[in-house]
Image (cartoon, rainbow, N blue to C red):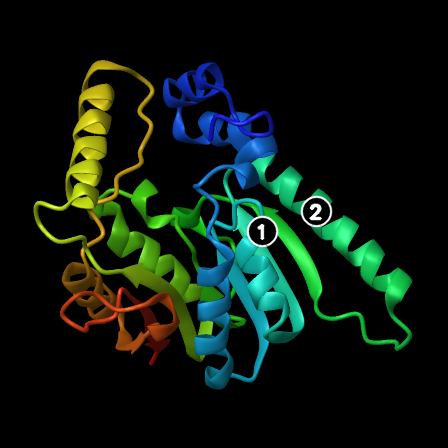
Amino acid sequence: MFTPQGPTLRELAVQALSSTMRGYDLLAPKFDRTPYRTPDRVLDAVTRAVRPLGPFDRGLDVCCGTGAGVGVLSGLCRERVTGVDFSAGMLAVAQAAQAARAAQTRAARTGPDGGPVVDWVRADALALPFAPVFDVALSLGAFGHFLPRERPELFRQVYASLRPGGRFVFPVGAPPPVGSRAYWSLLGFDAAMRVRNALWRPPFVMYYRTFRLPDVVEDLGRTGFSVRLIPLTALGRGPDGSPRARLVVATRR
């Protein structure tokens, strides 16, 4: 992270002492140069797993950030892709990057088909302003920003934005083995965030260990989704042979 292109230690400190929204507004210009951006190999694995579930006309990237998920959906949807986020800074970066890609595509394209229309909407994921028109909704790396008590409402909002039969898809990584270096790192990060939020206002909500797959599947079912899991084998397997990540496919009944 501490490279000439990435945020400095001071910038990260200012972000960490801001609200969640303000922190991401500040980080937005350098976000894609941090480890927080979803890696390309994850984007590729999700794309390959979601494509057979289509075809899709309209897609929604929930908590789109700088638009990595919009890029995935643009290759899967035929008509329209919408990215929604509550950070104006992240949306501005996403929109600028998409406009630059579109200009390059038009310059190189010889046919009339320019891909789906892309929209950007600023809104809270807990109050999505959409009718049930989307065939697929995707979210990448955003669930740590929602407390467990907020998760049912988040799922209800996505459910209400999907047409009947629409899919809500997102990857979930397997928890690290107890006692491993990754286990202690995530435990330490969450503990530090809890202390920070107990002592400092406004809160910055970002936790790694609150999105447990069994709880998530239960909340999705209570919302009205039917749920299945697809192993993302391209992302590897653990020592016991189980996949390191799965794609959650929640279908609106």
**Element marked by disc 1:** loop
Q: Do the numbered discs 1 and 2 sit on residues whose CB atoms are within 8 Å? A: yes
Instruction: Write the residue at 49% across / 18% down.
Output: 11
Q: Is residue 56 left or right of residue 111?
A: left
Question: Taking 176 as reference, is 43 left or right?
Answer: right
Residue drawn at point x = 53 percent, y = 27 percent: 3
Residue on which disc 2 sits: 97
**Quarter in which the C terminus is drawn:** bottom left
Q: Amino acid at mark 1?
A: Gly
Residue count near mark 2 (Cα–Cα under 10 Å), binned few <14, some 14–19, many ≥20: some
Q: Nearer the viewer, residue 133 or 36?
A: 36
Instruction: Name the amino acid type tagged 2.
Output: Ala
Compared with 97, 137 (above or below) is: below
Q: Quadrant of residue 92?
A: top right
Q: Residue 103: image x %, image y %?
A: 84, 55
Which image quarter: residue 57?
A: bottom right
**Residue 239 placement (x, y as % from top left):** 16, 66
Disc 1/disc 2 C-alpha distance (Å): 8 Å
Between discs 1 and 2, the one toward the N terminus = 1
**Residue occupying image coordinates x 21% and y 71%:** 221
Task: In the rendered structure, find residue 127 and report the number of the disc placed on it.
Answer: none
Number of numbered discs overlaid on the protein picture: 2
Q: Is residue 249 above or below residue 183?
A: below
Q: Secondary structure at mark 2?
A: helix
Which residue, as the protein is rendered here, is positioned at the far front?
Answer: 239
Query: As displayed, is residue 251 above or below residue 152?
Result: below
> Is residue 66 rendered to the left or right of residue 201?
right
Task: Between residue 194 and residue 43, name the one nearer to us.
Answer: 43
Q: What residue is pinned by disc 1?
A: 67
Residue 59: quadrant of the picture = bottom right
Give how far across and how far down residue 14 sits, in percent: 44, 16
Residue at the image position 47 percent from the left and 53 percent from the top? 39
